[in-house]
Image (spheres, helix red, strand yellow):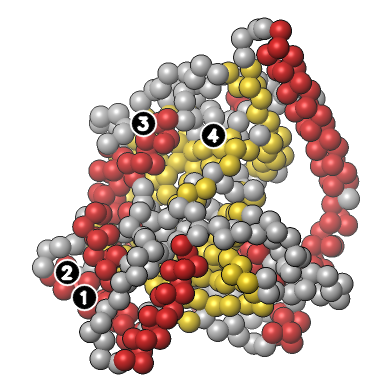
Amino acid sequence: SLENSSWCSCDEKYDDDDDDDDLQESTKTIAETKSKLKADIPTAAFFFARHSMVFHHATKRWYLIGVTETTPPASDSDTNNKEQEEEMMTWMEATEMKLQQLASSSDEIKTTMTQSTPNKSKQQQRRGDVVSFIPNRSQERYENDIADCHEQIRLGESYELCLTNQLEATIPIPDTNDDSNDDDIMTPFGLYRTLRQRNPAPYSAYLNWNLQNGMNGDDYDDASSVAICCSSPERFISVQRQPDQTLRAEAKPIKGTCARVLPSEGRTTLTAAEQREDDRRARSLELSIKNRAENLMIVDLLRNDMSRVCNIGSVHVAKLMAIESYTTVHQMVSTIRGTLPPNPIPTATIGNAGAMATSDDVDAHDDADDNTTNTKKGKPRSFQPSSSPNACIDLLKACFPGGSMTGAPKLRTMELLEDMEDNVPRGPYSGSLGYLSLNGSMDMNIIIRTAVLTKPKESEYHVSVGAGGAITALS
């Protein structure tokens, strides 16, 4: 679900004690604009995906998933069931044919994708070298907020506060009617492709919620339209059905990050010296007292949240403060797991497979579930769900918002952060994006390292990028 962090609201509240009147007025103006822009973004957005194309990266296989409802046999309902099934089979057969055509011309597609990769020099020629982002709160103000965090920790009000800020920019929209303008980077999906290329991440996702590309004159855009270009490395919470039909919940909070050593320009691999330095950084992160303290506090918080829903005694820490290495960073990641109680089987039966999602381009990263995939061409397998999605909803309710983006203890820390961040909404940043499936499974990320695009005017995008970090006594 696409969620606002629960403490964010659009009420305007500002610090009137700032000695610099000009700085205060500038900050207030930015905050007012931001509040108005974020006010219309939905707090939560869901859509029911009756047709899904899922790509399994590990096996490089496509799965076509369709949802049809079946009702007790009766003249009218039975006819309706057959019509739904025929419609679904027609879609599956047509889509399968398209995929086969694409596979047969894969070399041509690769060439096209390579040619359409955003060209940096062309971008610089068209729009200059830099897009200017304005922070919601100035550096001086942010440093004062950090000092305030330390004071709240000294007073015993919090152990850890995840203080954030928002960077704002306005980008002109290219004229889509101009055939000479092939600059894909200026579209939301073009930006997402660039993020995937430069910062690949395991829980990246793209969601376009009614936001149209370019100046096309469509009236489809409305005040709630938004695009989310997310390159998140962090799983918030997931639920997976195990071979024994139990539901396993898993959270993977990240606390502790350092930059990796990247190969020298023109190289694709590290030199021996670079590899030693990269290993040293990973080891330094692993031994960091500050980062270990941050991580442990959030682990305890999530253990508490998950224990409200999971079976008694089932919540445990599978991995504590493990170092996971990605393309550009080393991360300190812990893994907490628990078992959800079984739920009654829903009264409605589901043909084929089902999923509820908020992303129209979310990649599948987990192992494929044999009970939801077709085993023979043209013969989809139907299944009976082993549990209802209620367990997932209960788990989300108990754990949201993610503790890695709040601090601990959660409720009091959120109250403190709301005041420090001038009651300006974080918007989708710090929230979660993913899917809930009709078979009882779920996978949700934490929306970080993300650009959020809205279109306040027909000729421009408003881009918001959230950034921040946890503050502890050792920060």
Q: Which residue is mark 2?
A: 152
| Front position in the image: 83 or 201 | 83
Q: Amino acid at mark 3?
A: Thr
Q: Are marks 3 and 1 in contact (CB under 8 Å)?
A: no
* Helix, strand or loop under label 2: helix
Q: Residues within 10 Å of mark 3 (few under 14, many from 20)?
A: many
Q: Are marks 2 and 1 in contact (CB under 8 Å)?
A: yes
Sequence-first tag of 4 and 1: 1
Q: Which residue is mark 4?
A: 437
Place residue 199 in its image quadrant.
bottom right
Q: Amino acid at mark 2?
A: Gln
Q: Is residue 283 visible?
A: no
- Residue 108 screen position, x and y as percent: 88, 57
Sequence-first tag of 3 and 2: 2
Marks 2/4: CA–CA distance:
41 Å
Point out the frontmost of discs 3 and 2: 2
Q: Which residue is mark 1?
A: 148
* Helix, strand or loop under label 3: strand
User: Could you tell me which quadrant the C terminus lies in?
Assistant: bottom left
| Front position in the image: 208 or 269 | 208
Q: Residue at x 23, y 84 (%)?
A: 17
Marks 3/1: CA–CA distance:
39 Å
Q: Is residue 222 visible?
A: yes
| Front position in the image: 273 or 206 | 206
* Helix, strand or loop under label 4: loop
Q: Amino acid at mark 4?
A: Ser
Q: Residues within 10 Å of mark 2 (few under 14, many from 20)?
A: some
Marks 2/1: CA–CA distance:
6 Å
Q: Are marks 4 and 1 in contact (CB under 8 Å)?
A: no
Marks 4/1: CA–CA distance:
42 Å
